[in-house]
Image: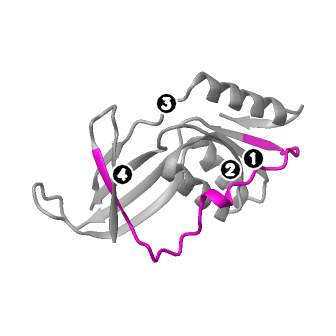
Amino acid sequence: RSCNTMKDESTGCEWRMASNPRSEIPNLLSSRMEVNRMTYPVCTLTLNPTLDRTLTVKEFVFDEMVRATHSQLDPSGKGFNVSRALKILGVESVALGFLGGFTGQMVEQMLRNEGLNLDPVWVAGETRTATMVFCGERYLKVNEAGPMVTPANLATIQEKIAQYLTPGQWWVL
């Protein structure tokens, strides 16, 4: 395995991401596709999505290596979660929101794999992650800040909203 190091200039934190050259993950950039601008009964808007990483440990021990007994990754954000629930109930929706970087690509691919209709606005920076570590009934949750959204990004999402907006439609913000 090799490691890519990324530094968040706003916090000074460095992140190391292990990458496996034999990974079965498809090229996420080539999987981007624009949703056909059809009418959906429900549109959702996720302004600050996240990739949730949930870990379970047997005990919290500071200053020592602790191995997780379970780990899980889930795309998240209020609008995305509503679109996921609607999909389970058989209701089509389109999910709009801001995504950025490798984490945004992962969120997009995971949601598309669930069959969601997405029309994201891509921003500079990295979609945030939230890490939750559970130990029995106790937990620790750490949320990263989301990427900066520019006035141009806001204008793009406003254009997309205007393109989808139809009378009688439900919007979840």
Query: Do callouts 4 and 3 mark residues in contact (Cβ within 8 Å)?
Result: no
Quick one: SS at disc 1? Answer: strand
How crowded pointer 1 is (Cα within 10 Å; few <14, some 14-19, many 20+) is rated as: many
Visible residue check, residue 158:
yes
Quick one: SS at disc 4? Answer: strand
**Residue type, mark 4 in image:** Thr
- First in sequence: mark 4 or mark 3? 4
Which residue is disc 2 drawn over?
83
In the rendered image, the vertical position of residue 97 relative to residue 10, given as above or below: below
Report the mark closest to the observer, 4 or 3: 3
Which residue is disc 3 drawn over?
148
Q: Position of residue 169 (x, y in %)?
A: 84, 36
* Mark pair 2, 3: CA separation: 24 Å
Q: Nearer the viewer, residue 40 or 119?
A: 119
* Mark pair 1, 4: CA separation: 27 Å
Query: Do callouts 1 and 2 mark residues in contact (Cβ within 8 Å)?
Result: yes
**Residue type, mark 1 in image:** Val
* Mark pair 3, 1: CA separation: 23 Å
Query: Do callouts 2 and 3 mark residues in contact (Cβ within 8 Å)?
Result: no
Q: Position of residue 158 (x, y in %)?
A: 72, 27
Q: Position of residue 109 (x, y in %)?
A: 61, 59
- First in sequence: mark 2 or mark 4? 2
Which residue is disc 4 drawn over?
131
**Residue type, mark 3 in image:** Met
Report the mark closest to the observer, 3 or 1: 3
- Residue bounds of the magenta highlight: 14-43
* Mark pair 4, 3: CA separation: 20 Å
